[in-house]
Image (cartoon, rainbow, N blue to C red):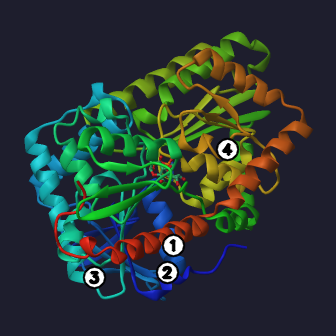
Amino acid sequence: MEAPAPASIRAGRLIVVSNRAPFRVIQQGAAQRIEATVGGVATTFLHLLERHGGLWIAWSGGVETPAPLKVPPGDPRFAIHFLGLSERQIARYYWGMCNRGLWPLMHLMPLNCHLTTRDWNDYREVNGLFAARCLGQLGAGDTVWIQDFHLALMPALVRRSRPSAPVGLFWHVPFPPADILKILPWYQELLRGMLGADLIGFHTGAYASAFLDCCEKLLGATVEREQGWVRGPSGATRVGSYPIGVPVDFFRKLSAAPKVRRRLAQVRRGVHVERIVLGVDRLDYTKGLVRRLQAFERFLEENPEYHRRVTLVQIAVPSRTRVPEYLNLTRQVEELVAQIVTRFSSEGWLPVRYLYRQYDPEVLVAYYLAADVALVTPLADGMNLVAKEYVAARSDEGGVLVLSELAGAAVELSDALLVNPYNIDEVARQLKRALELDPGQRRQRMRKLRLAVERNTLTRWSQSFLHALRAARAANNLTPARAGPARRGP
Ligand code: ADQ
């Protein structure tokens, strides 16, 4: 059983701020349609706020500002307050700085970076809009929890107006070493913005340590490595690793639900093959789809005995479709799928099934249950929730997880078959090993993986982050220099 709501959430309201919410409201004349969005942050906080209540501030996804959305409509647990952005802000803040600037930079892919002053100016402006909206809602006792790299400047902006409010920042993506961060012309502003938070959380100790290095080397800040503090003249920020969890109960229940079992039977009938290998991703170049497909092709080349017996089901949800790098990726993936199908398929057997669409959690779980092997091979990934969802869904202790050692998830899920996703031969080899693991070993590995996922559920993650946030705020309140509205950080 997952633990009840943490006291720190019950004390005041929890105000979550993120770029996108789990829903988009689409106005069609007088009628409204609600559409689900896909992504790790949206999925996570939907589960969390449904359980604990609170307030969510997010961009509407367009220029419009719909009325606050109560979720769920009949018996609301929380409300989403939307923010509309101008076309210019959408182009420069979202498509420009976030998707073509900071995203590739954080994932150590500087060659994909497009960094312009114009985009940064809008990034700064939009962070200001989010801060203003949050300050308008912020009551005494409320806690502000800001999400991800879209809003790096926001903590300092909230802090400046409300020095005593607890402000946390969770960084969902990796954090690069100083030599890479320096590529961003505004790296000092970014770091100072983040340091407005009382607590900054990362998925792994390595990302937290990279951040501390950057503060020391690029800002000249005083860093206490052991306890994870960055100290400046007007404030201190605690920095730590808080690996995100998944709602284990939700996946356990879904895996037994009759609707999911019916869908599972349908999937098995539809794919109609001895063994299913599964990939589930947002279609993003960091997720390693191209190399994964090449590895599967290599596997088929080298193991003809598996022809007609194994199918790779790759589910890819369209993502950031206006960014040229993503359009190229979509084309590349389609071409590779076509190439493998042309090369290897025979009557009654498709080596790859490519499903380019968004699914409800019920359908995803049916695929998780059908998969003999899950291939989760990102080239860089803050955590990777798909790996943890697969494990959480496998109450039957079946299935094998092949996991990239470059995903944050590899730290906790070290009982997976770990691979270097850049090494196609190794991925092909480990896929074969996964298919041939004896049932005893398979079960033992999955059992250990399940223990790791159950130890750190979504609720525990939020509890430990929010408790640490309260403690960091209390420590800051004890130091008079930190109570004033002066600029914090070095
Ligand atoms: P994302 O990069 O979005 O998240 P990830 O952690 O893989 O990546 O989460 C994706 C989510 O989307 C999962 O919950 C998955 O079930 C869902 N999803 C994927 N394909 C889908 C489909 N076809 N239909 C419906 N849902 C689908 C960011 C970081 C990650 C970090 C998370 C959480 O980039 O590294 O793990 O935040 O911190």
Q: Amino acid at mark 1?
A: His
Foreground mark, 2 or 4?
Answer: 2
Residue position for label 4? 413
Choose the circle earlier in sequence order: 1 or 3: 3
Residue position for label 3? 138
Q: CA distance from mark 3 to mark 2?
A: 16 Å
Packing grade of label 1 (10 A; few <14, some 14-19, many >=20) is some
**What is the secondary structure assignment of the residue under circle 4?**
loop
- Give yes or no for contact between labels 2 and 1 (Cβ–Cβ under 8 Å): yes
Residue drawn at the location 67% of the way across and 44% of the way down: 413
Looking at the image, residue 135 lies above or below residue 62 = below
Residue drawn at the location 80% of the way across and 42% of the way down: 445
Q: How many marks?
A: 4
Q: CA distance from mark 4 to mark 1?
A: 25 Å
Q: Is mark 2 within 8 Å of ligand 1?
A: no
Q: Amino acid at mark 2?
A: Ser
**What is the secondary structure assignment of the residue under circle 3?**
loop
Q: Where is residue 181 drawn, in percent x and y?
A: 29, 36
Q: Nearer the viewer, residue 262 or 446?
A: 446
Residue position for label 1? 467
Residue position for label 2? 8
